[in-house]
Amino acid sequence: MAASDSIQRAERRPPTDKATGSNNQFLRGIARAFAGSLIFSLPMLMTMEMWWMGFTMSAWRIAILLVVTVPLLLGLSLFAGFRSARSICDNIADVFVAIFVAVIAAIVTLWLFGVLEASMSLREVVGKVAVQMVPGSIGAMLARSQLGESSAEDEAGSGEEPYWGELFIMAVGAIFLSFNVAPTEEMVLIAYKMSVWQELCLALLSLLLMHAFVYSSNFKGGSSMGEEGFIRIFLRYSIVGYVTVIVVSMAILWFFGRADGTGMEEFLSASIVLAFPGSIGAAAARLVL
Amino acid sequence: MAKKKTITQTGADKNKDPEASQQSTPAIEWAVAALGAILLVAMLGYMVFFGLSRPESPPQILVTYGDARQEPGGYALEFTASNKGGSTASQALIKGVLKRGSETVEEAEVTIDYIPQTSDRKGTLTFKQDPSHFELKVGVAGFADP
């Protein structure tokens, strides 16, 4: 309970000193958020298909994507947040700070890359920034909660997450890794190249890898392994987790227009291909967060 | 978790200061959060406004150009392709034709990867002969949906 000690210590400090201290801490947090936003979104900031998404996606889809991002970040803040005894207001503040950081990081980077130009319409500029804002803000949020601060507190908190909270974390991990590859042409190309049997094998491999990750994370955590058997973990986390990842993959493909005018079989196979990195991301997120 | 909460609450009670319980959210954080909220609402509002005011419609490419410029290899004609429609055109083929009467003297073409809705893209067509001596026609030959 090192964290509660530090809280007590902070309370005893005079108010003015405390205010500057927390301001400094906040500025450090902002710097960390910028770093996280860039680390996580640079692959996408440097992918041309991702720039094109800014104008090929319809305005409505971008609007929906922006709306969906807020509860996503809020959930991430609630489940992976670093500050204990926080109010919902603190979490909401964190969400908008992450959005601010991601938007600024995207504007500056894209402008330096020459992807944003004065001759472009506002629609194009806003679209490009909005699409990049999603992975960037997840990165910013993760950086503020994961890089630094008190890790002992995180460890303590991670065991107490509710089941749907864990599924949520897995979905975020899937979104995160899928976003990296989903906009590229290769996604569809790989789906074309694969036979039905190869697709089934890939789905199976995704499931097995995911289970291996989840199983080892439970082993590492120690506590839940004794209570829950192999089959139970497989059903509760691996199967349900994989279904979550498939749903996330389908949603991302729809957002990026990969579902438009595509046959059901092609859409499904693209979803299975995308669910491969997605399931790794989901399992890793559960391991890390 | 329960232990931490009680400690924080007692701390706050002692100080009799509502700010103390949220010591980790300073005013500057709220200011930055407000900016973030404004950015999000602005982007969202713009996209909704755009979606409402400009329903999806096919691309409409308009090519404008000025006078050709003489260069060592020939004549360069700079043009601007504007998409006035409601969706993006991809692989737009811009074609320039020099004609004398019904006879085609020279052709030049260039493909532009993407012309987003309401956006402009610039390009150049090069001719061996001076376009000002002929009848010049520049337009879009075709494009694909992205």
Image (spheres, rainbow, N blue to C red):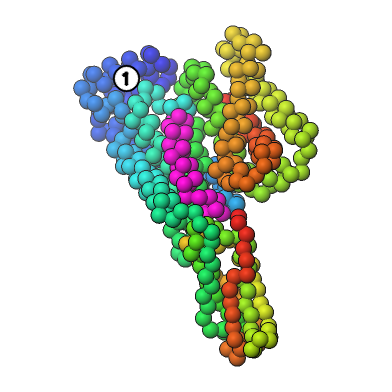
Q: Which residue is drawn at the image coordinates 33% and 15% (left, top)?
A: B6
Q: Can residue A241 be seen?
A: yes
Amino acid on which disc 1 is placed: Thr
Answer whether residue A58 is magenta in the image. yes
Q: Mark 1: few, some, or many residues within 10 Å (few <14, many ≥20)?
A: many
Q: Which residue is drawn at the image coordinates 52% and 65% (left, top)?
A: B60
Q: Which residue is drawn at the image coordinates 79% and 33% (left, top)?
A: A197
Chain where mark 1 sits:
B
Answer whether residue B64 is magenta in the image. no
In front: A152, or A17? A152
* Relative horizontal placement of residue A32, taking residue A189 as reference (left or right): left
Q: Can residue B128 be seen?
A: no
Extreme residue toward the bottom, this view = B133
Q: Which residue is drawn at the image coordinates 62% and 59% (left, top)?
A: B144
Q: Position of residue A284 (x, y in %)?
A: 61, 29
Q: Position of residue A148 (x, y in %)?
A: 48, 32
In front: A241, or B64? B64
In front: A12, or A240? A240
Q: Where is mark 1, residue-wise?
A: B8
Check the image and report above or below for A256 versus A232: below
Magenta span: A52-77
Locate residue A31: give its quadrant: top left
Q: Position of residue A154 (x, y in %)?
A: 48, 24
Q: How many marks?
A: 1
Q: Position of residue A247 (x, y in %)?
A: 59, 32
Extreme residue toward the front, this view = B102
Q: Main secondary structure of the magenta part?
A: helix
